[in-house]
Amino acid sequence: MAETRRRLRSSTVVLGGMGVIAAALTSCGSDPDRRCVDRDSYDYINGYKIVADKNCKSGSSSSGKSGKGKKTGTGSGKRVDAAWYYDAEVSGGYADYGTFSRDEAVDRGGFGCSGSGSSGG
């Protein structure tokens, strides 16, 4: 009877561990957090002004030039150099400390992601 309990416990640990590893490895493939920002609006203190997502193309852009020259929806006629800005800190309608490169944002990911480890030497 004690032998049955040990098997149950060890199999539970193994299955639980496999779940943790699977979650960590699949998290690398997910899209990073992104905001549509006006590239011409950078403020040294606040960062880039966040604009409506419709100003950026719906697809991901690694070049950071999607939606260039689109008008804002405010009716002001002002053109916005909009682009997706990834993994940024957001505060008060501004985003900062991120990247315009989706690939770089994915590489910043945690455990199991390419480019995130150190080469121990």
Image (tube, helix red, strand yellow):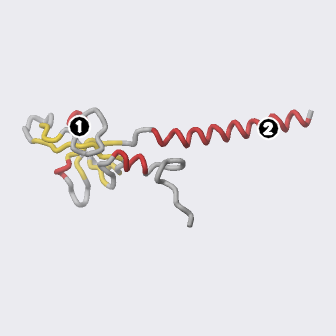
Residue positioned most to the bottom: 121
User: Circle 2 sits in a helix, a strand or a loop, which is it?
Assistant: helix
The quarter in which the C terminus is drawn is bottom right
Side of 24 where 78 appears, left or right: left
Q: Residue at x 49, y 48 (%)?
A: 113
Q: Is residue 72 above or below residue 104?
A: above
Picture mark count = 2
Instruction: In the rendered structure, find residue 13 and report the number of the disc placed on it.
Output: none
Instruction: In the rendered structure, find residue 56 and report the number of the disc placed on it.
Output: 1
Side of 5 where 108 appears, left or right: left
Side of 76 where 90 appears, left or right: right
User: Circle 1 sits in a helix, a strand or a loop, which is it?
Assistant: loop
* Disc 1 + disc 2, Cβ < 8 Å: no
- The residue carrying pointer 1 sits among few (fewer than 14), some (14 to 19) or many (20 or more) residues within 10 Å by Cα, namely many
Asked which quadrant contains residue 97, the reply is bottom left
Cα–Cα gap, marks 1 and 2: 51 Å
Task: Out of 34 and 117, give the one closest to the viewer.
Answer: 117
- The residue carrying pointer 2 sits among few (fewer than 14), some (14 to 19) or many (20 or more) residues within 10 Å by Cα, namely few
Disc 1 or 2, which lies upstream in sequence? Answer: 2
Amino acid tagged 1? Cys
Q: Mark 2 points at which residue?
A: 9
Image coordinates for residue 14, horizontal then vertical, percent: 72, 39
Asked which quadrant contains residue 16, the reply is top right
